[in-house]
Amino acid sequence: MSILRPFLSRVIRHGQLTVVAPDGSQEIFGAPAPGFPDVTLHFATRRGMRRIVLDPRLGAAESFMDGDMRIVEGDIMQLIALIRMNTAWDRGGKLDDKTVVGEWIDWVKTRLNSINRRRQSRANVAHHYDIGNDLYRLFLDTDMQYSCAYWPRPDMTLEEAQEAKKAHIAAKLALAPGQRVLDIGCGWGGMAITLAKLEQVEVLGITLSEEQLALARQRAEAAGVADRVTFELIDYRDLAVRAPGGFDRIVSVGMFEHVGAANFDTFFRAAANLMTADGVMLLHTIGRFGKPGATDAFTRKYIFPGGYIPALSETLAASEKSRLIATDVETLRLHYALTLRQWYARTLAHEAQIVAMMGDRFFRMWTFYLAGATAAFESGGMGNYQIQFARSRHALPLTRDYLGEAEGRYAG
């Protein structure tokens, strides 16, 4: 227990964490407090404890995944929430699990890992998205929106909140009949199909995932919009060379996190080149509330290799180089937390199917990922940004009144 005591006694102050060692001895950290969960851990091996000391985030994940650490009271969502709530970003909290040198190493690894040349980008996408559409069907909404939903009311279903998200984004695109729309990182096609249903526009969705491409094409056919909605397996950088000035509108939802900091300038240059002179783009991305940072080792290794969550400052700085005007910026503070809790609940409800499909270790990894992400949006430094860009100051109405009008029409 002595190897864990310094770390846990420093972090856990509110809420109670009981740790049972392999020899049966136990120690309690913190004290019960309103709003904070109480959790009990049991370590089957000393290896599991050592892993956490060496690297609290990756070590805890792998100990949990391998069964060296079991949660006997509470669950992984409550454990990570307990730690994050005690180190809340809003109140200046920090986990302090890295030395200055360790933080610098993580920063360097993140930059090198997210250079994301074309071949590597496709391999990174396959790692996460080509593991099978059947898995995603089990925990996503019926439209398979794998990004932050929009919750005008907290009592909405996940399906309603994802429909609200699409209407919210469509309004910001200022759509008009006859426009040509590009969806960069189109997922399983839900956004592209919805836009074509809302307005008489033509949409091209692009992805690097074979699994997503096949299903998106099937869905467009089934929805009766295949004459106006097409999908292609192509990198945005290659499309920018092939179709300069080809699109009146660009939408990109949940893809910018995969671009990599080294490619931010390239992304915005490509987007600007793809748009007409009066083009408009809506970028929906996870973002950091504070300054630029690094991707943690667990996420780099198991979830999103090559991924990096951008700070708003570096996102806007990159867009400025291509003379894109940020015409509207909205910060969605808790919307993704609400979304992730729905995904987590649905994942737990389908445990048997996921274990049969992917195995026990994968299931524990997936729940750790969803729980960690939830805590990052509830207590950590993560949020979502929706940034509207225009190439011309004359491209959009002078006031924001058009947004509410269009959103009401689309949501209705």
Image: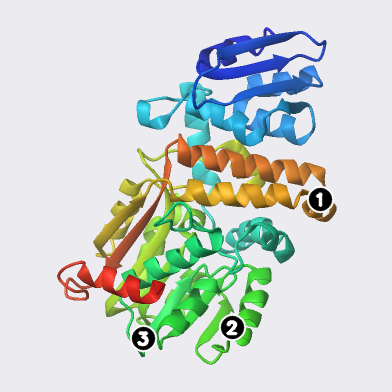
Q: Which residue is mark 2?
A: 220
* Residue drawn where x is 26% and y is 61% of the image: 328
Disc 3 element:
loop
* Residue drawn where x is 77% and y is 53% of the image: 354
* Of the pair 49 and 200, the residue shown nearer to us: 200
Question: Which quadrant would residue 297 be assigned to in this image?
Answer: top right
Tell me which numbered mark, 1 or 2, is placed earlier along the sequence: 2
**What type is the residue that disc 2 sits on?**
Ala
The quadrant in which the C terminus is found is: bottom left
Q: How many angstroms separate mark 1 from mark 2 (CA)?
A: 31 Å
* Image location (x, y in percent) of residue 103: 48, 29
The quadrant in which the N terminus is found is: top right
Disc 1 element:
helix
Instruction: Look at the picture and state if 282 lies above or below 378.
Output: below
Task: Name the disc covering residue 352, or none.
Answer: 1
Tell me which numbered mark, 3 or 2, is placed earlier along the sequence: 3
- Asked whether the viewer can see residue 308, the reply is no
Q: Which residue is mark 3?
A: 179
Q: Is residue 132 left or right of residue 274?
A: right
Instruction: Look at the picture and state if 117 lies above or below 351.
Output: below
| Outermost residue to the right | 356
* Image location (x, y in percent) of residue 212: 64, 70
**What type is the residue that disc 3 sits on?**
Gln
Q: How many angstroms separate mark 1 from mark 3 (CA)?
A: 45 Å
Instruction: Look at the picture and state if 204 lies above or below 367.
Output: below
Answer few, some or many: residues within 10 Å of disc 2's Cα (few below 14, many 20 plus, some between 14 and 19).
Answer: many
